Structure formats: C-alpha cells, structure tokens
C-alpha cells in the first residue's frame, strides 16, 4: 500500500464528507477507523500504526484548517470511548475518563490521536455533528440525531469500506410547519 495514495485518498474523502455534511467552524467530527481493514486484514487483527497515524494526522490537518474538532472513537474494548482535545471536553462539559489508549485497548487510531493532539483526553461519549467510518467501526452512537447518511466520493480507503454520517436538526410541527432548506441533501 502506497502511503502517498492513502494520504491523498483520505484528504479527498474527508473534504468531500465535510462539503456534503455542511460542517461549520466549532462543530465536532468523529472518526472511527480500523487500520486492519485499510491494510486488507480483519478489524482488530492486523493493526497498522503507520497507516493509522497517517490517516489521523491528515484528518487533523484538514479539520484544524476549518476550525472543526476531531473525536477519535476507540474499539469495543474501551466501550468506544473517544480521544478529544481537553479544551473540547471542557467546552462541551464532557466527563473525562481514565484511559491511555494502546493498540489492544483503544486501537491504532486512538494511539495516533493521543500522540498527535496537543492535550488529549478520553471521554466516554460525544454527540458529534458528523463523522467518517473507515472499516465498519460503527460510529452511529457518536453522531447526534437526526443522522443522515452521506455517500463519500470514494467508498473505499485501501481495502476498507468507507461510510459517513451527518446530522440535521429534528423536523417538528407536522404539516403546518415550514422547514429550512436541507443543507445536507441540498434539495
């Protein structure tokens, strides 16, 4: 697997998802990543720290340029807790938990985030505005309601299946209500 291609494809995917989801400065983007799936293995069985670090650093670069915060979801062994910047946890009133991610409890993406972020902490849960799922890691529990599927321009990263979610406010009021234009589907 060529790392230059992986970086380019990651940048293409995240930029496309951000455009389609309409995220703005100050919002939160969650990443679920199986580096095992990216390199052609089975989730949790072939972790690759170099690949995870490349993907997480690329996302951090793209998101930071736009003022969007990153939350990196861990594996089921840490109940899918998330690595975030301490300042984000404070701003959102998230409870910090005691955990230092490792390859077998958190996974390679969390290890990368913990080393790349300025002041990382782990929180138990978050309600992100959108997210990217690389390798079928199940990020749905981390994205606020109402979730809207986003189809990335590239559906694979390496050998991993790629999906994404955005969110929109709930529509309330029924047939008498007037709603704003759908910023995700752009109808």
Image (spheres, helix red, strand yellow):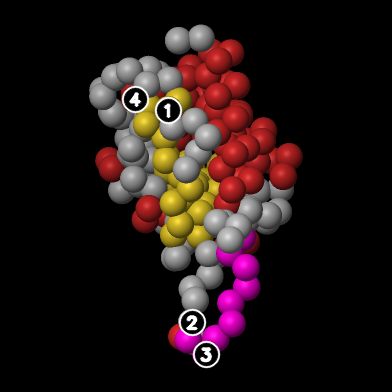
Give the labeled residue for mark 2. 172
Of badges 4 and 2, the one in the foreground is 2
Provide the secondary structure element on which disc 3 rests.
Answer: helix
Q: Which dot, 4 or 3, sits closer to the camera?
A: 3
Return the x and y of residue 139 as percentages of the image width and height. Answer: 39, 48
The residue depicted at 37 percent of the width and 36 percent of the height is: 106
Name the quadrant of the C terminus: bottom right
Q: Which of marks 1 and 4 is nearer the N terminus?
A: 4
Q: Crowding at label 1, few (<14), some or many (≥20) Cα neighbours within 10 Å? A: some
- Is 1 on the left or on the right of 161, as rendered? right
Seen in the image, is 111 located left or right of residue 106? Answer: right
Q: Name the residue under label 3.
A: 176
Q: Earlier in the sequence, mark 4 or mark 2?
A: 4
User: Distance between the Cα atoms at labels 4 and 3?
Assistant: 47 Å
Element type where label 2 sits in the image: loop
Q: Mark 4 points at which residue?
A: 37
Above-or-below relation of 36 to 30? above
Report the span colored magenta.
Answer: 175-183
Q: Badge 1 is on which residue?
A: 156
Sort mark 2 into few (<14), some (14-19) or many (20+) by Cα contacts within 10 Å.
few
């Amino acid at each position: 697997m060529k790392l230059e291609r992986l970086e380019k494809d990651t940048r293409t995917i995240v930029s496309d998802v951000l455009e389609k989801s309409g995220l703005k400065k100050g919002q939160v983007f969650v990443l679920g990543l199986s580096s095992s799936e990216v390199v052609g293995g089975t989730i949790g069985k072939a972790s690759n720290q170099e690949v995870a670090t490349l993907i997480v650093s690329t996302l951090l670069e793209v998101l930071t340029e736009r003022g969007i915060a990153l939350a990196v979801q861990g594996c089921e062994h840490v109940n899918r807790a998330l690595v975030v910047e301490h300042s984000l946890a404070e701003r959102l009133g998230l409870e910090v938990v005691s955990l230092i991610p490792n390859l077998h409890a958190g996974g390679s993406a969390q290890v990368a985030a913990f080393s790349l972020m300025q002041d990382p902490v782990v929180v138990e849960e978050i309600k992100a505005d959108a997210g990217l799922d690389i390798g079928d890691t199940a990020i749905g529990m981390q994205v606020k309601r109402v979730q809207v599927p986003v189809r990335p321009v590239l559906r694979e990263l390496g050998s991993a299946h790629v999906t994404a979610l955005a969110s929109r406010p709930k529509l309330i009021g029924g047939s008498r209500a007037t709603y704003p234009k759908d910023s995700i589907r752009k109808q």
